[in-house]
Image (cartoon, grey):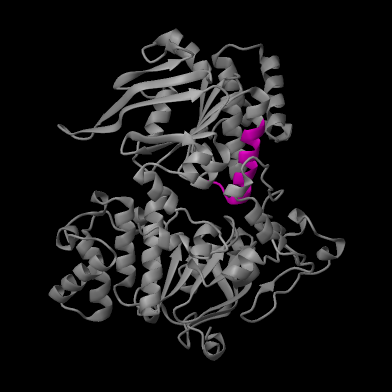
Amino acid sequence: MLELEKKVNPLLKVDELQVNLAKRFGGYSVVSNLSLSIEQGEIVGIAGESGCGKSALSLAILQLLPKGMERSSGKVVFDERRIDELSLRKLQGIRGKEISMIFQDPMTALNPGLKIGTQLTETMSKHLNLSRREAQGRAAELLEKVGLPRASELLNQYPHELSGGMRQRVMIAIALSCQPKLIIADEPTTALDVTVQAQILQLLKKISREEKLAILLISHDLGVLSQMCDRILIMYAGEIVEQGTAEDVLHRTKHPYTRGLLSSMPTRDKKGKVLQTIEGTVPPLSERGSACAFYKRCPVSRPDCLQSKPMLQEGQGHAVRCFYPLVKER
Amino acid sequence: MENILAKAENLTKLFKTGRREIRKAVDGISLEVHEGETLGLVGESGSGKSTTAMMMARLLEPSAGRILYRGEDVSKLKGAQKKRARKQIQYVFQDPLSALNPRHKVKTLLEEPLAIFKVGSRTERMEMVEEMLAQIGLSSNYMNSYVHQLSGGQRQRIGIARALMIQPEFLILDEPVSALDVSLQAQILNLLKRLQKQFDLTYLFVSHDLNVVHYMCDRIAVMYLGEIVEVQKSEDLFANPQHPYTKMLLGSMLDISHDTQANLQLAEV
């Protein structure tokens, strides 16, 4: 839509990000040379199998990588600031305020020993300089906004007293509490029932549209991404192998890996047929080299795919990391 | 009329949740499993689908009601008789990593059911283990591996193989692919389909994933708050759901449709 005008200054720009395991674990590359950008208010999805590096990528953006993994090069620019160079103290002014995160499992992300109210006001009193009373009032508002009635009662409850869906709504309320510009949501609905999942996703989408909130949505579920995202990035073995609008990636698929993911989904039209699968498994970190990472599992690979690594075209358009992209529409 | 393999009558399970609190996890359900079919059991967490599955496998004692297997009441059996009945009914768990003993090698894990039922000599049992590994698409090199050395998909293959070792008729699959990535999920679903044909198995397939259930099952039972609210042939259920909860469930499915992003609006019902 307005892509051309906005293109100049994306909200988040990750530039040639490289995440490696620490030397003592072999120093292997987990995320290799990855670039992406997110515009204000845009919902961008990242898909891929376990071990493809999608969570490492999201953690690296906020310097939350666990011990044993490190960002060895690359830039992260948020709102025209290099946030990868910030000191921990300065970064804490951004975490939870301008960029917040929603994790998969609210039971481990919430503190079981603190009341909902305390956890909700904690972020706000830290970032917004609100008095206790103001913060309490705003907390109640937030809970209502995420679809939780009886806010005053809820503020005095502990996480274990809530259902999974309610807990995830509380997580979203906390993430929204300081009116961030970007939310990184790592499998936010994977642990939830389908009906609750639909409600939570709807809520996120509504808030994103109303408040121009950008969301980086990480999920292994292409169904979720197709319903939520403006653009989708497919990751394989630490790299983006295909990116473009949801429509392009899912319906004008170019990469054999994306095609493989789609055809292994047991959608309704495949009943009674044998599912197409992707042979083999993701190559271990130690075996990722200078050739196409998907070579071994690829149904259309040719010998020269081993000679060098295909490049991903720059820019916002539909791009693919493959020497022999699929041409036929799926 | 189809042959009824297993039948639940008025099955109820109560759990004590506090000193005076009792929760009805399963509330007087009746269910028929036809021989050779795959019956799906769907519902949200807490709806009682796993409790039902575990009672059907005789892993949990029902508080009331009975389970008939080939017409025989198996719910009151004890000791040797219970063991005999269980031989026909095997269970595959969601998470093979916690269901399989991490200190045993694959060959021990697969031999154990045979040893329990005193099938064959040690050498014969090892041959059977090797045969089964071939059936599930693993080479015999994995005989001496431990579970943690296997990938998620391989682990679940071992979980399935272990359940099949003593040639049961009825396999209860509790979310067997929920922990797997789509490409592995597809491999396991294909495998289950093939094994079912090959060994004439009947499946009770518990899942929260409607796409998977639709793909796998002949009939589907929908559970809600401990009750079965609807049982229909898969196609009929999807084409013409009767119960409001089923409608809501189907409305929440997120498909990759050309009609991009239509589903999320539908779910608002």
Instruction: Residue at 69%, 48% (x, y): give it.
Output: A276
Residue toward you, A64 or A100? A100
Mark count: 0
Instruction: Residue at 74%, 54% (x, y): give it.
Output: A297
Q: Is residue A310 visible?
A: yes
Q: Is residue A30 visible?
A: no
The stretch in magenta equals B179-194
Q: Position of residue A122 (x, y in %)?
A: 24, 69
In the image as oriented, which residue stretches furthest toward the left? A133
Q: Is residue A242 above or below residue A313?
A: above
Q: Position of residue B191 (x, y in %)?
A: 65, 36
Instruction: Residue at 76%, 67% (x, y): give it.
Output: A327
> Was residue B181 drawn as part of the magenta stretch in this picture?
yes
Q: Quadrant of residue A321?
A: bottom right
> Was residue A199 drawn as part of the magenta stretch in this picture?
no
In the image as oriented, which residue stretches furthest toward the top? B80
Q: Position of residue B223 (x, y in %)?
A: 37, 37
Q: Quadrant of residue A14?
A: bottom right
Look at the image and tell me in which quarter the C terminus of chain A lies.
bottom right
Q: Is residue B36 above or below residue A289?
A: above
Q: Is residue A123 left or right of residue B138?
A: left
Q: Position of residue B114 (x, y in %)?
A: 59, 17
Q: Quadrant of residue B122?
A: top right
